[in-house]
Amino acid sequence: MERIPAQVHRTYLVILSLAAFIFLIYFPTLHFGFVSYDDPEILLNNNFVQNFQIKTLLTSVVARDYIPVTLLSFSLENFFFGLSPFVFHLNNVILHILNSFLVYILLRKLFDLEKNWLIAFLMSAVFAAHPLRVESVAWVTERKDVLFTFFYLLAIIFYLKSETKKYWLRLSVLAFLLALFSKFMAVSLPFVLLATDWLRSGKITSKIIKNKRPYLGLSALAAAIQITLHESVTIESGSWLNPIWSLVFYLSNSVYPSKLSITYDAIMGPPAWPLIASAVFIVVCTIWIASHSLYKREIFFGLIFFLITLVPVLQIVPFDNSSPFSDRYFYVPGIGLFVAIAFCVLSVFKKSATQLIMVTFAVALGFVAHERTFVWASDDSLWGDVVNKYPLSHSGLLNKGILLANAGNGAAGEKFMLQALQIKPNYDAAYGELGNYYGSIKKYPEAFDNCKRAYELNPRNFVSLFCMGQISRMMGHYQASIEIFNRMIQKIPNNYLAYYNLGVTYFEMNMWREGTEEFKKVVELNDSYADGHNNLGVGYYHLRAYDKALTEFNRAVQLDPKLESARLNLASIRARSEN
């Protein structure tokens, strides 16, 4: 019997060890549900995802991001398993396991660590265990991170293999395209490939640059799409500090992760001196060690990888007031930083001592990450964690207020929302949520004023514009409601809910023909929307097109058997037909 090579045994050992380690950290997430932060918009209420419309998935934009591959992965899961949180969480964990294994493969190839494979394994274990990974793995919507990283790492590995066979280069470009369409952050890949060429040959030639043209072309295309989708750029006072603040955050938290949160808006501004000191200490030590080390090139490559992959999210040009740093942004850049740190340790200590340090570090990080996963158990634990750590976080206070209001404790919820506005007076989202809350308790003038204020502060806040249209209708200001929904349709022509509410407004004015036309557009845009078919049936009934009304009521009940109004309408029109 032919013996299995030791390398194959080792590969099985590595992937099984990584899978067991990661599962021990992340198994609690398999029991969690979805959260209200982006999950509804991108997954739960996304009709294109739920109906597996591939053509639409390839052309749709969600939350002003073009991520068709990510949406396709969600759509496939929903198609086969429904909206099962267990499946979505499990697939995130599986992708994280695969990414950790690909990190191991990449490090072995880049640094010729065949003999020192254990060092490559421990580096990948540190990557897998770091608490800054939790947001990307435990949050379903951040499938974007784990999925783009999977293709990103494959693209680098295939590129390295293309030195022997050229078809690997085509596979690398394809993997890069899939990475870009999973998340824009993959745009850095051509420059990472240049860094790998420098690492392996010590130089960058015109020929090396020339063979990056397919990657650079795809990066330029992705950048153009991103700039178009995020056309608004807001330069705020002190925003030039964003890149420095980001680097300080990542450098300090890479070694000592502390007070991690889904948002850090409460600590925006000049970084605290202890953080600056720790970041400067890490940089100085790294540069000093690198200059005296046998691993100069490896350490500098790690730092270059870290900086290159971080550039797309450093907020050098701040888009849409996005945070200059976030846990999830560190998912890929962390690979480079951990490489630099590991080779620095290897420069100072013996190999056996380095291995012991890395094992201890990985295990300690794993314990912290495991505890961090429980924050993602629910909306309450997620935003409670923010408010507990950062009592002056305006987004934490707002979301805590929304949760309380939705749970029936409106007075407490309103208090938190007003607190958020005290901290950030021009917080459009807080005005919008207050408007929704006042609308729910029928304080219509206050609701309209708050939604209007939100829209004035941020004309791209279409939720507030939508709120203004609904509140206008509820107050009987029908003409104003029609004008608002028409304005919204001009800005977002495929928003079926705008047509729906426009149709409802016409119906309340007894303008049945005009309303029916709007509901026709609703079902054209979303054929699976039961309420749209039901209201279209009501319109046909009033226009005495009874056969068409019967068809629409049947379709509404077929789509949603629990929709009581559709069932009653269907029974009524059937009784009329029998008589």
Image (cartoon, rainbow, N blue to C red):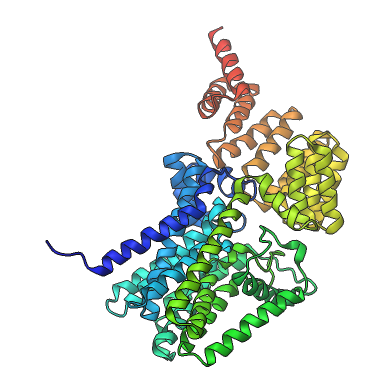
Side (left or right) of 153 relative to 482: left
Query: In the image, residue 24 lies at what x, y percent?
Result: 48, 53
Q: Is residue 474 above or below residue 318?
A: above
Residue at the extreme left? 1
Query: In the image, residue 479 lies at what x, y percent?
Result: 80, 39
Residue in the foreground of this view, choosing between 247 and 149: 247
Residue in the foreground of this view, choosing between 221 and 35: 35
Side (left or right) of 377 relative to 399: left
| Quarter where residue 261 is shown | bottom right
Side (left or right) of 421 relative to 45: right
| Quarter where residue 109 is shown | bottom left
Q: Is residue 491 above or below residue 485?
A: below
Residue at horizontal 58 percent and vertical 61 percent from the top? 131
| Quarter where residue 403 is shown | top right
Query: In the image, residue 143 lies at what x, y percent?
Result: 52, 55
The answer to whether one can see residue 435 in this image is: yes
Q: Quadrant of the C terminus?
A: top right
Residue at horizontal 46 percent and vertical 66 percent from the top? 125
